[in-house]
Amino acid sequence: MGKKLVTKKITILGMTCGHCALKIEEALKKTEGVKSVNVSYQQGNARITYDESLLSFEKIKKEIKKLDYLVAETKQEKTKGPQLLVIFIVLLGGYVLLNHFGIFEFFNFFPEAKEGMSLITLFVVGLLTSVHCVGMCGGINLSQCLVTENSSSNEKLKSNLLYNVGRVISYTVLGGLVGLLGSVVSINGVARGAVALFAGVFMIIMGLNMLNVFPALKRLSVFMPKSWNTTLKKKNNSPFYIGLLNGLMP
């Protein structure tokens, strides 16, 4: 039986980041009958060329569903105004409530690192202010350190060490460079406010993208090129390089 190549463009629901698109793409490339595939997180779709004599479209949908994503039967409906209004009211209400009971004052408990502090004090400050890392970096840490169920204790220990050594090197070098820059260039209050505003807007955009509220905002997403991911996976010490890249996270 000869080849019967078919190319289809499908809409995929449930992608929340660039890695989602990469995961789907890699899984489909391993599926027998798939000749080429390109998944775009920004556009929320995939372009797949496959041999219809070896693979059915239903099988492709099942492979995507195994990864906890869905193929839209029709074009995804636009988010309705009332739904956006409800999300806004809930977020605003939550903020007012937390602010009223002084929950945000809790964060003032954590001390700030200042010039002249002893190394022991800086170490304690680092421990107290690293609580947020559990949520921010916990998933990345687990993905690099757990390896697989069949991995030996030495392999797991090696992955942990490589990842954390890379992370410490990255933060130390970048921290030193920023400190050096700060000793030469003075940043006024307006510039600091602009940086804080930019960071806040960036985080809001990331949150809206994860909720899929404004699909058009996905075009503003920034993530690692696919070629980098492929290169890192081929390297034996990839946890070390992932640790180095940790310092570049916003």
Image (cartoon, rainbow, N blue to C red):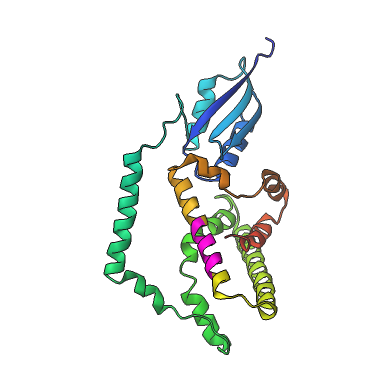
Q: Taking 33 as reference, is 192 above or below it? A: below
Residue at screen point 43% across, 45% down: 211
Residue 76: image location, x then y, percent: 44, 30
Q: Quadrant of residue 243?
A: bottom right
Residue segment shown in magenta: 193-201
Measured along the vertical axis of the image, is residue 16 above or below residue 107?
Answer: above
At x 58%, y 31%, the residue is 46
Q: Position of residue 89 (x, y in %)?
A: 30, 51
Residue at the front extreme of this rendering: 190
Q: Is residue 4 left or right of residue 201?
A: right
Assign the C terminus to one quadrant of the image.
bottom right
* Front-most of residues 42 and 191: 191
Q: Nearer the viewer, residue 244 or 47?
A: 47
Query: Where residue 208 appears, x then y in whole percent?
Result: 45, 48
Q: Quadrant of the N terminus?
A: top right
Q: Let me know if residue 198 is in the magenta part.
A: yes
Residue lying at 54% horizontally and 21% vertically, measured from the top left: 57
Residue 203 image point, x, y percent:
49, 56
Magenta highlight on residue 128: no
Whether 26 is drawn above or below 229: the answer is above
Label total for image: 0
Q: Tell me if I can see residue 92 in this picture.
A: yes
Q: Is residue 30 visible?
A: no
Q: Quadrant of residue 177?
A: bottom right
In the figure, 35 relative to 20: above or below? above
Main secondary-structure element of the magenta-colored stretch: helix
Q: In the image, 173: left or right of 189?
A: right
